[in-house]
Image (cartoon, rainbow, N blue to C red):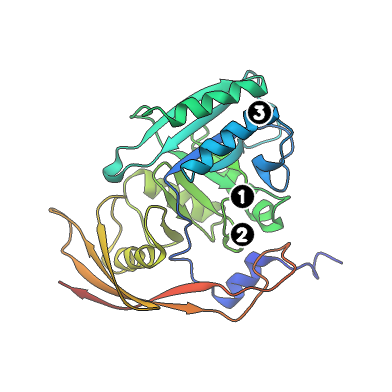
Amino acid sequence: MTAADRFLCAEAARARGDALAGTAPYGVVWILIEYRDGWPPNGFDGLALDPVTKARVYAAAQALRARVLLVRRHGRGVPEGPRRWAVLRHHRQGAHRQQWGTWSRDTDLAGIVDALDAPGEPGHPPVVLVCAHGLHDVCCAVRGRPVGRALNEHWPDLVWECTHVAGDRFAANVVIAPDGVYYGNLDAATSVTAVRQHLAGRIHADHLRGYTDLVPPEQAAVAAVLARFGPAERHAYTTRTTRLERDRWNVRVAGGPPHRPAYDVEVRAHRSPPHQLTCRGRSRASAVSYEVTSITAV
């Protein structure tokens, strides 16, 4: 198969016009493990670590629905010193917390389990994660690595390349944690703009997949409000959802003073015909998208 014949899921999704808003997976806790060697296709699950320590970390992560990501700094040079790990926690109203440690031996990763039971520390800057997991999906490497390079030039202390974050077809994907914000369909230029605006407290609807503490209809509703009324900081709006039918919701998107008034946003779900949704996928699957049909000021 030539490069011209190879199926690339991100190109196919753009050609279909797959909707971004409402596609961020749930998550309020992230575990980062710096791993400088090659990443297995299934990330942390595929590492040949001490089995007892690995099982403890996995069980603790599962209990909190935490996403475990392998991370590395951009570039081919091998950093010196111990590898790092982190536990990042999202809290409403921006009271996010982080805890960092180092590991030289597999058993050192048991510190992650203790960190998951601790409150963590406030005041850390957010972490910018760029999915560049080529063995999981070709598009994540082809599109993710140029984005990692561009962002690293601006924020080398904040940016890490990472393993699979979900939504390969929206590569390049960037996750800002523990803010819990997913961006997709990025390239080098748009990623720098999106991250710069995010760090300045101005989240735009452009390239926004959603907030990870909201369900998909709420993600789509907030994105629609941002698109119509302009960017806002991460916690400018709250949501309250009423299900009207099986595939239709009313989402009350409200901002307290001095923010904008509340809006009722009607959202409808649609299921696509089956498509190949990932580069390595062998079967076709349907995807759910979320359409905003009306926005009404309350």
Q: Is disc 3 placed on a helix, strand or loop?
A: helix
Q: Which x, y percent locates residue 234? A: 31, 50
Residue 20, how many percent across, how many down? 48, 66
- Asked if residue 54 lies left or right of residue 7, the reply is left
In this view of the protein, which residue sits in the foreground, 173 or 252?
A: 252
The x and y percentages for residue 84 are 57, 26
Give the residue number, with chain letter if any, for mark 3.
52
> Closer to us: mark 3 or mark 1?
3
Location of residue 41 in the rendering, given as x and y in whole percent from the top left corner: 72, 48
Q: Name the residue: 31% across, 47% down.
A: 201
- Quick one: SS at disc 2? helix
Near mark 2 (Cα within 10 A), the count class, few <14, some 14-19 or many ≥20, is many
Q: Which mark is residue 168?
A: 2
* Pointer 1 residue: 164
Residue placed furthest toward the left: 257
- Helix, strand or loop under label 1: loop
Q: Cβ–Cβ below 8 Å for labels 2 and 1?
A: yes
**Residue at image x 58%, y 71%?**
14
Q: Amino acid at mark 2?
A: Asp
Say which amino acid is labelled 1. His
Residue closer to the observer: 191 or 96: 96
Vertical position of residue 75 compared to residue 197: above or below: above
- Camera-side residue: 186 or 48? 48
Residues under numbered marks 3 and 2 in contact, where contact means CB atoms less than 8 Å apart = no
Instruction: Identify which residue is drawn at 81% across, 64% down.
Output: 3
Whether residue 281 is visible: yes
Type of the residue with mark 3: Val
Mark 1 Cα shell of 10 Å, populated few (<14), some (14-19), many (≥20): many
